Amino acid sequence: MTNGVRNNPNYPTIEKSNDLYRRATGLIPAYTQTLAKGPGQYVNGVAPKYLERGKGCHVWDVDGNEYIDLNMAIGPLSLGYGYDKVDQAIREQLERGITFSLMSPLEVEVAELMRDIVPGAESVRYSKTGCDATTAAVRLARAFTGKNKVLCCGYHGWHDWYIAVTDRNRGIPEATQNLSYTFEYDNLDHLADSIDADTACVILEPVVFQKPKPNYLREVKKLCESRGVLLIFDEMWTGFRMALGGAQQYFDVRADLAVFSKAVANGMPISMITGRADVMKLLDKDVFFFTTFGGEALSLAAAKATIEELRDQNVPAFLAKQGAKLRDGYNQIAAELGMSFTKAIGYEFRSNVTFDGTVGNVLEMKSLVQQEMIKRGVLWGGFHNLSFSHKDEDVAYVLSAYREVLPMLKRAVEEKNVGAQLKGTPVEPVFRKTANFNVKPRNKP
């Protein structure tokens, strides 16, 4: 009998998952195309590795086990799996064609939607992945300012200019590495000290989980303007979730350029760069940013249907309401149990469960919670990343699972045997930091 969304008597059988995993060994480097979906982020031996289908906020693995999904494809599924209006738009466009020899009218229609919804979106261009858009924005900033250096804060994709500042920078020329720097989030003095005469742009995620000081983002904008530096908002997570118009709307701050992906097309691959017309105009002739699939029509049809639904249903408000229930509910349960070493942090639309490393191994504590949530039919990676399909009963069930799991964690911490409770290999450290970002920039030459 396969496991369902309940307190199952046993951990899920994952024979088909493990068979696919064995077949991928040596064939697919790192096993996964997306690091956050890979086996290193789940308890190996307990968690499923491959999902076969999804509907709403529920997913089924290849062995038939069912889960409430709290990851939602690591961001793109803002409405939910198999969302009827979006899927119908895709089917209708499929009948007309996927990609054409000339431009699609959807390119204009979606751009008009973006202009109407996103503050400062005077011009719009499309691509396929988030890092396409961030890299195009950086190239634009360099072209517009005539400067070279980039200051970044957060996660911005796999391209050379960003990965140069991480510990996975092999294969990137030293000259490229010497053009990218980092700064500490929510520390205006640190940013001001990092900008020099050759700085082209500051690119940051407006928020990840940490709430900035009042007016921090406005002060960043003023600082960039005073230094002749372009400000780029990486709105992959905040766009259409934090507010319909993203962090620019939420904080009433206009970046010079803003980039979007994830939530905008409910799972279809599309990204967008938006911003000031005078900067974006360089894409006419001066800056080359073209790709065969930039105008692919299925994704544009999905984006149009998704944006309209996000707007018409006021989805950001729904995400805030449901997300607050989970974040605050988790914290209430932990407080009732006297578990001061764990807390859910972040904004309502997306929160993160944290653990205090002074009481035990953080990865083992996270793994134990994950293991027991999976046993109860919740696909859990430490985040509350919700969609419009997470209804009241789903949120209530997740909280009921926490009420069963957190006492187990408390007891294991008190008895100092968290690791002994694990039925598989603990999760690995995440590549992405969730607070303070890369806090130690290189020394400026």
Image (spheres, rainbow, N blue to C red):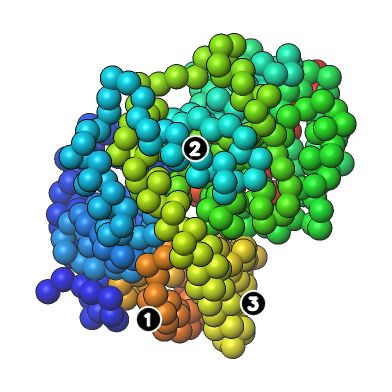
Quadrant hosting residue 368 = bottom left
| Identity of the residue furthest to the bottom in this view | 336
Identify the residue position indicated by label 2 in the image.
Answer: 111
Q: Residues within 10 Å of mark 1 (few under 14, many from 20)?
A: few
- The disc label shown at residue 340, or none: 3
Q: Is residue 417 visible?
A: yes
Image coordinates for residue 309, horizontal then vertical, percent: 42, 58
Q: Amino acid at mark 2?
A: Ala
Vertical position of residue 178 compared to residue 424: above or below: above
Image coordinates for residue 434, horizontal then vertical, percent: 60, 52
In the rendered image, which quarter contains the C terminus? top right
64 or 294, which lies in front? 294
In the structure shown, which secondary structural element does the residue marked by tag 3 occupy? loop
Vertical position of residue 334 compared to residue 353: above or below: below
Q: Residue at x 66, y 24 (%)?
A: 279
Sequence-wise, the earlier of marks 2 and 1 is 2
- The disc label shown at residue 393, or none: 1
Q: Residue at x 50, y 48 (%)?
A: 430
Mark 2 and mark 3 in contact? Answer it, CB < 8 Å: no
Q: Residue at x 84, y 37 (%)?
A: 223
Q: Could you tell me how far apart the alpha carbons at marks 3 and 1 are, in whole angstroms?
A: 27 Å
Sequence-wise, the earlier of marks 2 and 3 is 2
